[in-house]
Amino acid sequence: NLYFMSNNQTQCILSPLPIFVRNIVNFFIFRNKLINLIGTLNFTCKSTANNLNFQTKSSNSYRAVIKYLSKNKLKFLTY
């Protein structure tokens, strides 16, 4: 979350929600597709035993990733 002051008011810009992706066979190919889609500095990724956890840096990047995942019928979850 990012907070900034403007005219004696605190405004909050919320970070996009995390995206949990399942059943990715080749991480490097998937990562390269995301880099081509939104750029290298617009997301972070962590892996667990079951998921790849992505955090995008902007709402535009978030929407682009969700659109890509939906279009390619990949299993993902966000909340």
Image (tube, rainbow, N blue to C red):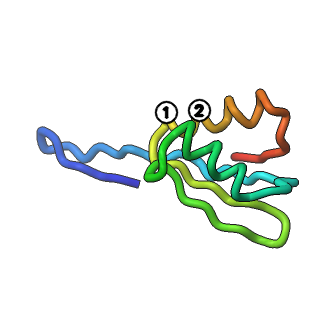
Please state the horizontal and vertical placement of residue 45, each as a whole percent of the image. 61, 61
Asked if the residues shown at circle 1 and circle 2 are in contact, with their CB atoms under 8 angstroms apart, the answer is yes
Asked whether, in this view, residue 53 is left or right of residue 38, the answer is right
Residue 30 drawn at (x, y percent): 71, 49
Which residue is depicted at the point 68% across and 59% down? 53
* 15 is higher (above) or lower (below) than 62: below
Numbered label attached to residue 27: none
Question: What's under tag 1, amino acid-wise?
Answer: Asn
Q: Is 74 left or right of 2, judged from the image as shown?
A: right
Disc 1/disc 2 C-alpha distance (Å): 6 Å
Q: Residue at x 48, y 51 (%)?
A: 40
Return the residue at label 2. 64
Say how many tags the image has: 2
Binning the other alpha carbons within 10 Å of mark 2 as few (below 14), some (14 to 19) or many (20 upward) gives: some
Estimate how packed mark 1 is, as few (under 14), some (14 to 19) or many (20 or more) residues with alpha carbons within 10 Å.
few
Determine whether the residue tagged by mark 1 lies in a helix, strand or loop: helix
Mark 2 is on which residue type?
Ala
For the N terminus, the quadrant is bottom left
Q: Which residue is mark 1?
A: 60
Image x and y of residue 10, in percent? 25, 47
Residue 51 image position (x, y, % from top left): 79, 61
Q: Residue furthest bottom?
A: 49
Which residue is located at x 55 percent, y 46 percent? 35
